[in-house]
Amino acid sequence: MFWGLVAVYWKQLHDIGSLELVVHRTVWSMLFLSVMLWRRGRLPFVFAALRDRRLLLVNVLSGSLLMGNWLLFLYAVDHGELLEASLGYFLVPLFQVAAGYLFLQERPRRLQWLSILFAAAGVLWLLLGVGHVPWVALLLVGTWGPYALVRKKSPMGALDGLAVETLLFTPFAIGYLVWLAWHGEGALGRVSAWETGLLLCSGWITAVPLVWFAYAAARIPISTLGLLQYIAPSLQFLLGWLLYHEPLDPAKLPGYVCIWLGLAIYSGEGMYARRRIERAGRP
């Protein structure tokens, strides 16, 4: 839900380029994470991970996917492409369900398969109705879907892993901000006090939901994680359509209805299964 609504935050910074926003997100996220790690005594574990070649390569991969996804999403927000961005995130759960089945031996139950089929039918309907190659949507899938799989397989904790991913790119981000300031082109000192405050707060806005996500990715089936992620693009779709008045083809509505029906079935089946397990465990 947080990710679905956060587009409103980034819309307030539409005067700042997407690349510069990604750089600010990186720098201020690292500052926020450093404070959290210091308070929890986790900084030595982060530095130890930097000396482990395997962990370093894993985090370079996941960090690259994460940065690419940030840049694409901010580009979509800045260019009035929230509806296409929502289509991309509608595709991500199908990728994750397939990844869970192929790589993690996760086997959905019957009603879960039914919900997945409804969601897949809805996404297929939307893809056929786009009328052009939705490159923003496809690139969002190509960055976020694999990122979730890498985080699922990573041995690092949610906070530590995100900190290493961010730290690897922080020197480049700082260098780019210095370069902008040197040429008198950076946002800091040039935009309003309101926008400056939003930029400085972009660290926790970025880091907190990513920690939540990484924490969840390590603890629940990736297929469940995938289906729950239909909430974010559904909210993005509603924002783009109702708040920012992006044009919506009525012919696409059946696709969205199928997706939402699939999510409802999956959620209902999960609650029923959990109650059944709880009843079976009672004396």
Image: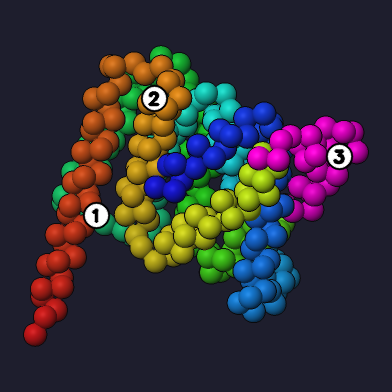
Q: Which residues are magenta?
A: 169-194
Q: Residue at x 46, y 64 (%)?
A: 215
Q: Is 17 covered by the magenta stretch? A: no
Q: Residues within 10 Å of mark 2 (few under 14, many from 20)?
A: some
**Quadrant where the image shows the C terminus:** bottom left
In the rendered structure, find residue 181 and report the number of the disc placed on it: 3
Q: Which residue is mark 1?
A: 108
Judged from the image, the secondary structure of the residue bearing numbered disc 3 is helix
- Going by the image, does 181 lie left or right of 144? right
Viewer-nearest residue: 57 or 260? 260
Circle nearer the N terminus (3, 1): 1
**Alpha-carbon distance for marks 3 and 1?**
52 Å
What residue lies at 44% left-to-right and 41% top-to-bottom? 5
Mark 2: secondary structure: helix
Q: Is 234 drawn above or below residue 39 in the view shown? A: above
Which residue, as the protein is rendered here, is positioned at the far bottom? 283
Residue drawn at (79%, 34%) of the image: 190
Amino acid carrying mark 3 in the image: Ala
Labels 1 and 2: the sequence-earlier one: 1
Q: Amino acid at mark 2?
A: Trp
Residue 241's tag is: 2
Residue 72 % position (x, y): 58, 34
SS majority, magenta = helix
Q: Secondary structure at mark 1?
A: loop
Relative horizontal placement of residue 116, taking residue 85 as reference (left or right): left
Residue 48 vs 91, above or below: the answer is below
Residue at left offset 35%, top offset 44%:
231
Q: Is residue 181 magenta?
A: yes
